[in-house]
Amino acid sequence: MINRLVFENLKHRPVRTLVGALGICLQVTMILTLVGLSRGVLGSMAERQRGSGADIVIKAPDSSALSYGLNMPEAIVDLVRGMPHVAQATGNLVHPISNLDSITGINLAEFNRMSGGFKFIEGGPFRAQNDMVVDRIFAQQKKLHAGDTFNYGHDWHITGVVEEGKLSRTFADMQALQEIFGENKKVSVIYVKVDDPKNTDSVIADIEHRLEGHKVYSMAEFVSLFTASGVPLVEGFTEVVIGVSAIVGFLGVFLAMYTAVLERTREIGILKAMGASPGYIMDILLRETLLLAFVGTVLGILATYGTRALLAQIAPNLPQMLVPDWYWKAALISIVGALIGAIYPGMKAARQDAIEALAYD
């Protein structure tokens, strides 16, 4: 009887029902899209680092996992190259173009030996000082093709487009980059390949002893830092957005249920006149809220497939992962927020005087 009454109430006012469900849908979509974006972007960065083929990463003392400190002398590369069990070592210069963009200078021959080389979709490798190679994602985002000229802190000639997953999205000759931006004989990061993975720990210990203060990571340790919990800014931003999303869902349900109570004042009066207890009235409204939360959550999960497809078209450099492990968390947040939003309207309905409610016009 109660369930039928709940369904009929929601069907009778489709606009209010839709607005309430969409409010929860927006909440769930915001949460899942942000979590998916943070995982997708950081996961892509980790994948590109693994694509270098290195076993060890060396960064300057004042650097962090996602940032580069003051550039190191290029002579350190030769020092590391001469250490026991080091099969290969190569230095890269990472020059920032903006807050989120940079170009990576590499020694092409050394990079190819360590990583296995580029797979070209268009064109070929850089040869001249102003040549640049970009990956497919960057080319798609900037609408670039081999042969184009592109200003990226400098006027570059695009010689090739390569498959993504190899360290960076943009590449130039390291010596050319050093000369263009005044970083002669400087490198930002050093990648090391050992002769046997079993020797990784001993090589790291040797590097730390000889390069005191420098940040030295195994590749496994380094890529493990590319998580939302490993990046305080991302983790904090995620928590803020989840909080805002919960407030949006709460307000959506609160307004929908408060409006429902006002619209159904006479109906509630009739139910109370027929002997319905305050608990019975509260039960009806809470069941409506749970149904709205369920429908809104399902719509929100489905909507993340749409945001993922949309981002793939308009911002391919921002990959969004699907996060099934977060579905139940988003559902819990939406349900709790919806129930809290329904408490005051429900109490207002439960406390209504039957005579006043019947006289309400």
Image (cartoon, rainbow, N blue to C red):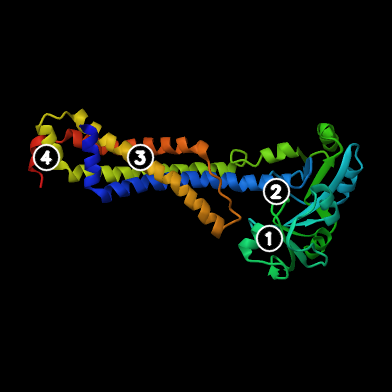
State the CA–CA distance, disc 4 to disc 2: 66 Å
The N terminus sits in image quarter: top left
Where residue 294 appears, x then y in whole percent?
36, 39
**N-terminal of the two: label 1 or label 3?**
1
Q: Dot 3 lies on which element?
A: helix
Residue holding disc 2: 48
In the image, what residue occupies the spot 56% across and 41% down? 235
Q: Dot 2 lies on which element?
A: helix
Where residue 212 appears, x then y in whole percent?
82, 38
Circle 2/circle 3 CB separation < 8 Å: no
Residue holding disc 3: 293
Q: Which circle, 4 or 2, is nearer the viewer?
A: 2
Residue holding disc 4: 357
* Residue 237 appears in the rendering: no
In the image, what residue occupies the spot 28% across and 34% down? 286
In the rendered view, does 132 fall on the left or right side of 302? right
Q: From the viewer's perspective, is residue 70 above or below residue 147?
A: above
Residue toward you, 147 or 285: 147
- Residue 340 location, quadrant: top left
Amino acid type, residue under disc 2 in the picture: Arg
In the image, what residue occupies the spot 11% across and 40% down? 357
In the rendered view, does 256 fall on the left or right side of 44? left
**N-terminal of the two: label 1 or label 4?**
1
**N-terminal of the two: label 2 or label 3?**
2
Circle 1/circle 2 CB separation < 8 Å: no
Amino acid type, residue under disc 3 in the picture: Ala
Q: Dot 4 lies on which element?
A: helix
